[in-house]
Amino acid sequence: MTSKKLVNSVEGCADDALAGLVACNPNLQLLQGHRVALRSDLDSLKGRVALLSGGGSGHEPAHAGFIGKGMLTGVIAGAVFTSPAVGSILAAIRAVAQAGTAGTLLIVKNYTGDRLNFGLAREQASAEGIPVEMVVIGDDSAFAVLKKAGRRGLCGTVLIHKIAGALAEAGVGLQEITERVSVIAKAMGTLGVSLSSCSVPGSRPTFELAADEVELGLGIHGEAGVRRIKMATADEIVTLMLDHMTHSSNVSHVSVQAGSSVVLMVNNLGGLSFLELGIIAGAAVRALEGRGVKVARALVGTFMSALEMPGLSLTLLLVDEPLLKLIDAETTASAWPNVPRVSVTGRTRTRAAPTEPPEAPDSAAAEGFALKRTVLVLEQVCRTLLGLEGHLNALDRAAGDGDCGTTHSRAARAIQGWLKEGPPPASPAQLLSKLSLLLLEKMGGSSGALYGLFLTAAAQPLKVKTDLPAWSAAMDAGLEAMQKYGKAAPGDRTMLDSLWAAGQELQAWKSPGADLFQILTKAVKSAEAAAQATKNMVAGAGRASYISSAQLDQPDPGAVAAAAILRTVLEVLQSQGV
């Protein structure tokens, strides 16, 4: 079965993609009749060397994303994973020559089709009297034993675009640029790894991997790598890649060792998430610095993709200060990242956390709040939530991502760990404030934020008094904060429904002579009834509001959890004979 692609046609996808890029970038123009993109200010390059590159489509943003002042003059694109036509390459060479440039350098990745087609175009242009040179970039560090075809051209080619572009912009001549980049390219290595393959529009995946396999050392066209390894952590994968590409027994290795200074390029092959890319980048920097290597610059992003392949490549380029100046030189190429011109290694990466303000003393007496009873209540609430984990997750799967029970269990374990560190504060206000901070940090999700808001607000009335009217006022304050920031209202099928119902009953605590247990019992029963009633409500807030009401035939898990917490508090207090 062929993969789904958002294209107009398989045959026209390369043309459409290039036309779309040019349509959105006023600095680019298409060469009429050819799949060629050129700088729109081509005439301003008179007297300077022109840089042309290209290859098959499907590697976006390479190559057209790197056209601009300080990088490429133009590119010639082929069909997906196919070398461009000789006629189009020759047309591009003629176009830049006729604009008055001082010769052309062709920067070509080491693939047979690219070498042949760019080479033939160069010979024809030379026969016409146009000064043209060609450098073939082979930065692949996958092969321990070199084959006749040599090292494949991979993402490191983009660094050559940047270096050659800076030299050309500075007015350096064609021969010198050719010689310098040829030497620099030999001090560079790239290695790729992928979790699965890509698929050319209209075709099936290029290779198959088992669920626990990773392809090491693959190319940028979906071709298989040098070996398959078992799935491992990001740190382990990065270590394996760096070991492979720098080990002296590998004839295609890059000679990076302790004391070396490098530019690191972490390249998304197309389908890796930004989350994973960040993890890999951090692992690569740590691993290199752990080997005594200075990471002078780190470029992270999508530079040379392989369609939607979920994988990455690491490129290492040995650098000195003059070479770094070329890397840092200005460019208007849209796909080149805005990288700080300072070394990555040696920078302070953390800042001390702000100091917490000193706790204001409560004017409310703490003697009336039994510490032992508080601990018993918290411990039993934790056991209740842990016991409800599976049930709450099952309820949440109908309306959310099925993690409500997991989130509440995470809160319970955080509270259990906190209680083991020492006794909780004796003051009710301080207790609720500490619980708020703990849940905000450890619970996560919207539930953690809502409980945190509730407890923070509820703590304020208890700073002055801790009698029953104060506890009723605390409930009111907590509910008001939840509604203000959570935007839910009673009847919206959320945890607020249970708490609101209980809060209405607790209003009776404000009356003189109110009975603690009689009113609390009514509040708990109201909360439980409200929780069950949520199954008949239309969700007005939260993730469930995006789900059709016909699918919501179970009570809201947050409301069930809140009612269970209140029930537990009541039962513990009754057992203690308060």
Image (tube, rainbow, N blue to C red):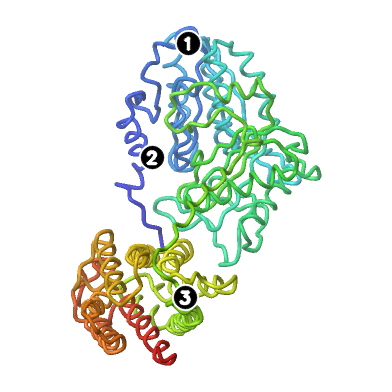
Residue at horizontal 28 percent and vertical 65 percent from the top: 477
Residue at horizontal 46 percent and vertical 12 percent from the top: 97
First of labels 2, 1 by sequence position = 2
- Find disc 3 in the rendering and name its residue: 409
Camera-nearest residue between 354 and 336: 354
Above or below — where is 515 with respect to 266? below
Q: Judge left or right: residue 393 versus residue 223.
A: left
Q: Judge left or right: residue 164 versus residue 65.
A: right
Q: Helix, strand or loop at disc 1? A: loop
Residue type marked 2:
Ala
Residue type marked 1:
Thr
- Find disc 1 in the rendering and name its residue: 101
Camera-nearest residue between 443 and 158: 443
Residue at horizontal 48 percent and vertical 38 percent from the top: 56
First of labels 3, 2 by sequence position = 2
- Find disc 2 in the rendering and name its residue: 14
Residue at horizontal 36 percent and vertical 39 percent from the top: 17
Res 272 visible: no
